[in-house]
Image (tube, helix red, strand yellow):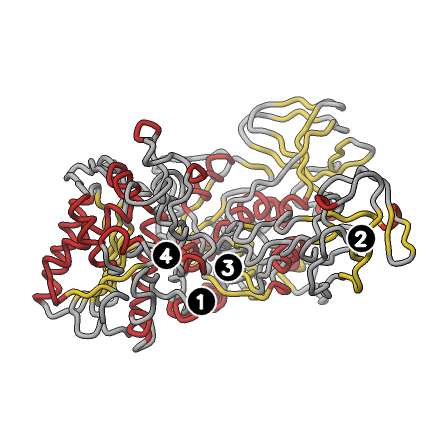
Amino acid sequence: MTGFESIVMVDWSARSKPSPARPVRDAIWIAVHEGGETRVSYHRTRAAARDALVTHFDRALDAGRRVLAGFDFPFGYPRGFARAVTGRADPLALWAELAERVEDAPDNANNRFGVAAQLNRLFPGTGPFWGCPRDHETPDLPARGSDRAGHGLPERRQVEQRLRRAQPVWKLYTTGSVGSQVLLGLPMLQAMRRRYGDALAVSPFEPADGARIVLAEIYPSLLAEEIATQAVEDEIPDAAQVRVTARTLAGLEPGTLETMLAEGDAEEGWILGVGQEDALRAAATPAPAPPPLRDDCFAMPAGVDWTPVEDALARLRDRLHPVVGREDCAVSDSPGRVLAAPVTARRAHPPQANSAVDGYGFAHDALPPGDPVLPLVPGRAAAGVPLGKPVPAGQAVRILTGAPLPEGVDTVVLEEDVNDSGGCIAFRAGIRAGANTRPAGEDVEDGARILDAGRRVTPADAALAAATGVGSLPVRARLQVAVLSTGDELAEPGTEVAPSRIHDANRPMLGGLVRRFGYGLQDMGRVPDDRDALRARLDAAADVAHVILTSGGASAGDEDHVSALLNESGAMAEWRIAIKPGRPLALGLWRGVPVFGLPGNPVAAMVCTLVFARPAMGVLAGEGWRVPQGVELPAGFEKRKKPGRREFLRARVRAGRVEVFPSEGSGRVSGLSWAEGLVELGDGAATITPGDPVRYIPFEAFY
């Protein structure tokens, strides 16, 4: 643990009016981590946030707690700015100067654009500050960065040159700007310095040792993947950023934070943790275990009788959430896994400009008039074997497909279009600049998001991740599904049994479906009609699985022990769904694990699994709610349907038409093997004649 008893992280804002009463992003969020707990608060104005910080600092000092306070804006400017403004290369003198110039009212009204224009007038040319609404634009403050010239200052600090996405401090307006937060944040920090005197130190400008309050610059994007993974449902991203950053800094190994605070540039400042990203990631607390499902998550409103299919699906979709945590998975093992967080490219693809063909490369601007004849430089450029030297203007080099373009080459001519003799090449005039080349990042730019959370990884996704430098992916732990069958009448397939008994067809079918869905199967076997035996088997299933599928025993008969035990547990609901084939689903929790009590009839068990359990398990597995994609096809059958229930017919496609199994009997297991999908008929009455369009859902759409 760190030497600080209180960790405070602040996401600052440069809004010119109070933020909405309802919490939003791009406002001020403060996280406080103390005593192993993290609290997050929302503040509508900078004045309110400042007062909250002062209150916390005062209480911490009174209680003898040491405080680290991190703010997500730069503490300094590129080298040379402080000296030009104050006469000294002292960033804290610049803080004092800005505090004199900046006016920031309690309602967030401020003069930051006017201050930026004043500061720009201290430099030659135009700039360095830029960006403002059109009504604030003046000759001293351009709206566009490209309008600046001759101000003589670096564009970025050293620390920002090490980070892909960090914005320069000069940018005051539009997406990603941080300059306004700096102009309005540093005067507030200067007020803190005046209030607390020697009890407060600013890292890295002052030694942190012995200070009771230490201020540091933070950049939450250093933990972008961890923040995305640990964000809870509907959490505003800014709140997640400060919460996870505070927990991470609190979890650093002893001495690590003190080392980080001592690092950095004494004039420009430094972002805490840059250069020690591995330590930060190691300290980032793993994603908390997903919250358990509520005991009443399957409860139906009082008085509900038959529930339409759409209503039942909506209730499942709204009441379930992921129940599996996160782990890392090698890219090679990732196909079929569900992503727990977005994935970004670690390098561009291609990483360098390269040749798209075998041929000869040269600088297009140096081509002579007419049909070019160019001398060849010795050597060649090949994929993985760069030339290693520049190509002089007016000369060419042999280059192969995929080879990085050497310095001095921006165009490639196909070898088929070239005459090569005597150390020279000749080809027809008219080739366009950049021909037969691929620019760096043509496919994917460095840092671009390539995959979204909740996506089931495909082999092509694995290729994309590998090509962009990603070696492991953040995935959800594989959902484990326990399958068990109940009933004295059941026997193992292949065994000799009396005619009064039947072989267990459901367990092989349900187990196969679970594997096709990509989940882990826990086969819990058969359970006789004995309540104690079933209780023990459910206990065993809850120890190894996230979901339990049972078949049989889900009604209200004397031997329907699944329903009885779920009722005893206090978390049972019988859903009478208007569906055919099917009958009431028994839904409940056993020791916090959701149980889907499926009908014992194999046809109904399979249809209910595909229609209800499959999308529900998708949510529990972290991949979201999946709606199977059906297609409209002409019917190759006749049917008259009564109103009141949605029907699913076993079907397949032949000669462009949908045919259905001759019998709708729910005991005809052969129809499941015969079928290749389902025809879905709506809740109302219908008369289907050959050629009428019907919705056909292939079984593959459920997988």
Q: Position of residue 595 (x, y in %)?
A: 47, 55
Q: Earlier in the sequence, mark 2 or mark 4?
A: 4
Q: Count neighbours of disc 2 (C-alpha within 10 A) and say few if under 14, some if 14 to 19, many if 20 or more.
A: many
Tag 2–tag 3 contact (CB < 8 Å): no
Instruction: State whether residue 552 appears in this view.
Output: no
Q: Earlier in the sequence, mark 1 or mark 3?
A: 3
Q: Amino acid at mark 2?
A: Tyr
Three-letter code for the amino acid on which mark 3 is drawn: Arg
Disc 2/disc 3 C-alpha distance (Å): 48 Å
Residue 631 is left or right of residue 89, and the answer is: right
Does residue 420 appear in the picture of this structure?
yes
| Residue 360 shown left or right of residue 339 in the figure | right
Q: Secondary structure beneath disc 3? A: strand
Quadrant where the N terminus sits is bottom left
The residue where tag 2 is placed is: 360
The residue where tag 4 is placed is 220
Distance of label 2 from label 1 (alpha carbons): 71 Å
The answer to whether the residues at label 2 and label 4 have Cβ atoms under 8 Å apart is: no
Residue 539 - label? 1
Vertical relation: 210 (above or below) 342: below
> Viewer-proximal residue, 579 or 215?
215
Kindly indicate whether the residue at mark 4 contacts the one at mark 3 (C-beta within 8 angstroms).
no
Label 2 SS? strand
The Cα–Cα distance between marks 1 and 3, rounded to whole angstroms, is 24 Å
Q: Position of residue 367 (x, y in %)?
A: 76, 44
- Among numbered discs 1 and 4, the one appearing first in the sequence: 4
**Callout 4: helix, strand or loop?**
helix
- The Cα–Cα distance between marks 2 and 4, rounded to whole angstroms, is 46 Å
**Residue that carries the numbered disc 3 in the rendered image:** 476
Residue 519 rendering spot, x and y as whole percentages: 58, 59
